[in-house]
Image: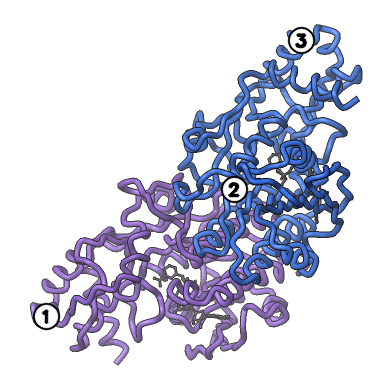
Chain colours: A blue, B purple
Amino acid sequence: MKVLILGGAGMVGRNLAIRLASDGTLGGQPIEALTLFDVVAADVQGSAHMRVSAVTGDISDRATVDRLVADRPDAIFHLAAIVSGEAEADFDKGYRINLDGTRNLFEAIRAQDGYHPRVVYTSSIAVFGAPFPEAIGDEFITAPMTSYGTQKMIGELLLNDYSRRGIFDGIGIRLPTIAVRPGKPNKAASGFFSGIIREPLAGQDAVLPVDDDVRHWVASPASATGFLLHAATMDTAPLGARRCLTMPGLSVTVGEMIAALGEVAGPEAVARIRRQPDPVIRGIVAGWPRNFDAARAAGFGFAADASFQDIIRAHIRDSEAAQ
Amino acid sequence: MKVLILGGAGMVGRNLAIRLASDGTLGGQPIEALTLFDVVAADVQGSAHMRVSAVTGDISDRATVDRLVADRPDAIFHLAAIVSGEAEADFDKGYRINLDGTRNLFEAIRAQDGYHPRVVYTSSIAVFGAPFPEAIGDEFITAPMTSYGTQKMIGELLLNDYSRRGIFDGIGIRLPTIAVRPGKPNKAASGFFSGIIREPLAGQDAVLPVDDDVRHWVASPASATGFLLHAATMDTAPLGARRCLTMPGLSVTVGEMIAALGEVAGPEAVARIRRQPDPVIRGIVAGWPRNFDAARAAGFGFAADASFQDIIRAHIRDSEAAQ
Ligand SMILES: NC(=O)c1ccc[n+]([C@@H]2O[C@H](COP(=O)([O-])OP(=O)(O)OC[C@H]3O[C@@H](n4cnc5c(N)ncnc54)[C@H](O)[C@@H]3O)[C@@H](O)[C@H]2O)c1
Ligand SMILES: NC(=O)c1ccc[n+]([C@@H]2O[C@H](COP(=O)([O-])OP(=O)(O)OC[C@H]3O[C@@H](n4cnc5c(N)ncnc54)[C@H](O)[C@@H]3O)[C@@H](O)[C@H]2O)c1
């Protein structure tokens, strides 16, 4: 089979590509070609059995997307996006990439006759907005409070409609905030959730722009890869018309994260965190969800991390392996 | 003040225009110019104090919309749309008019410096999809099951985001199905809800494509006008980030509608209804909401009709007045 990852050079996309290249299969079927599309060149190694190619381009250019899709990949992972901070700062860019880009993909698929790929779309818990119940259930209103959340939600609606129409077989997964995010910080307003763990573990100072009692919904990079693989291979028929699911996660406060860091890495790590309140980030985060009851996803076999300590330990293992 | 109605030649738009022309004011302020934009020419009379002009054009043409908005109307009613049946039959046309057209309007407003009009957008209960609770509350998930509902919901999301950004002062009202719709049937799949009352009252046969126990959420044309005027003049600040409201309505079954018709117009009228089940319409209607708890809108002062008998009597009065 052929697999295409849009946003294949990003954090989640790269992890997925490495996993697919190592597995060599998706849902039991051998992968003969894996294409990683992104504005920047992805660098993932292939193997004797699997050709991995990096294609650079912009998803907001329809002709580029048409060319990609003309290859008729059996599974498409659509992860290409600009994240919350950047979509909020640049109105036009956010709509162009996150909305028009997504439409370009869906329309390019529609333009192919007799083609019906599985499409896995990464949505976000940013589709929800305050005020919230104690735990957000699967029938709670999606009322985004950022342009990013708006664009992700529009993508969900389009995915449902195109799937209902039989244009492709779509599934949307609302990822929790992925922590601990490896590598350099990105422009997501949620970046500090990873920074306060990653930087101290690397012997560097980290800035905490919000209060310790801020509660958030997180999952590890490995969980994100697991969600994507499961979404690509599960039976979508039981989803009915509602093809977008809130993924399971851990509901933890910043204080609990810091305590877990202390437990795993000691007080020197904790001492690296500098509290420096930022009213803009505080404001954005105040509108974010804190806790979910992700019963539907659990019922469909998606599973979260066991504890935040485990997430930190996995991050330490991954960082050592990457050296 | 200047008022613009997009879709001003349609059923709801025309009623609103007649009311504005007769009131001469909106929210206590004199209207000096009322522009009715539509693909077909609207024919509403002005007065010595108010210039009424009909402009024909297509909302999916950005330059046309730019020209309209350059006039900087203080209040814009955005009612231009193709309805459910047509948007389902013609995928491209639905997205072009209902989605791209709406974006054209919002972008045209954004392109004007220092301009911040009130924008009233007519959404629909088609933003909801089965399965439903007994009565759909204000925090229930919007999960459309038609392309029309998808397009309306995307419009709601954009309206919220553009309003949050301070681009305009938007409010979306989810109209119940408007019955009794005067004049000729349109292409809405809900057309029969009006047809089974309107046609018999005019001495003509009507076709009923669904079962008598089908329950639906309706409001009169006069209520729709009332909702629009209230939305255009109310204080939007208390709406917060959720600027789209389910309008109040009556939850009635087809059987109850027919009984009300018998009460008001006698058994001869009822005898005009021919039961002719249509599996396509049945299928569409099966995914439609039946009952709401429109508490938020009620709290903001929106009020529904008292009974379906009243709706029929109002329709009879209006038809006589129109002759
Ligand atoms: N990481 C998280 O916490 C999180 C949470 C919820 C949802 N998501 C979503 O998951 C997906 C992957 O997230 P990530 O953390 O890997 O983000 P990322 O920023 O690391 O990766 C996104 C990739 O998309 C690429 N991209 C941006 N604009 C593009 C364009 N115009 N054309 C082609 N590619 C373009 C970027 O270059 C980047 O490599 C995104 O859609 C994101 O919105 C992530
Ligand atoms: N009537 C209802 O039961 C109901 C229920 C819910 C929502 N709504 C919404 O309320 C609004 C008005 O409904 P209505 O019953 O008057 O519908 P209508 O069909 O009578 O009026 C819509 C008008 O929009 C115009 N229009 C269509 N395409 C256009 C384009 N490309 N450019 C400019 N104008 C265009 C049509 O010519 C028509 O005059 C619509 O947005 C509809 O979706 C109506």
Mark 1 belongs to chain = B
Position of residue A96 in the picture relative to residue A183 (left or right): left
Mark 2 belongs to chain = A
Please give the residue where the numbered disc 3 appears in the rendered image: A262
Spatial separation of the CA atoms under disc 3 and disc 1: 80 Å
Spatial separation of the CA atoms under disc 3 and disc 2: 35 Å
- Same subunit: marks 3 and 1: no
Check mark 1 vs ligand 2: CB closer than 8 Å? yes or no. Answer: no
Mark 3 belongs to chain = A
Could you say which is closer to the camera, residue B241 or residue B229?
B241
> Decide: marks 3, 1 in contact (CB < 8 A)?
no
Amino acid on which disc 2 is placed: Gly
Q: Quadrant of residue A302?
A: top right
Q: Nearer the viewer, mark 3 or mark 2?
A: 2
- Same subunit: marks 3 and 2: yes
Q: Nearer the viewer, mark 1 or mark 2?
A: 2
> Decide: marks 3, 2 in contact (CB < 8 A)?
no
User: What element does badge 2 sit on?
Assistant: strand
Residue A97 in percent (x, y) is at 76, 57
What residue sits 59% from the left and 53% below the top?
A: A156
Specify which label sits upstream in the sequence, 3 or 2. 2
Query: Which of the numbered marks, if any, corresponds to residue A172?
Result: 2
Mark 2, residues whose alpha carbon is within 10 Å: few (<14), some, or many (≥20)? many
Position of residue A158 in the picture relative to residue A87 (left or right): left
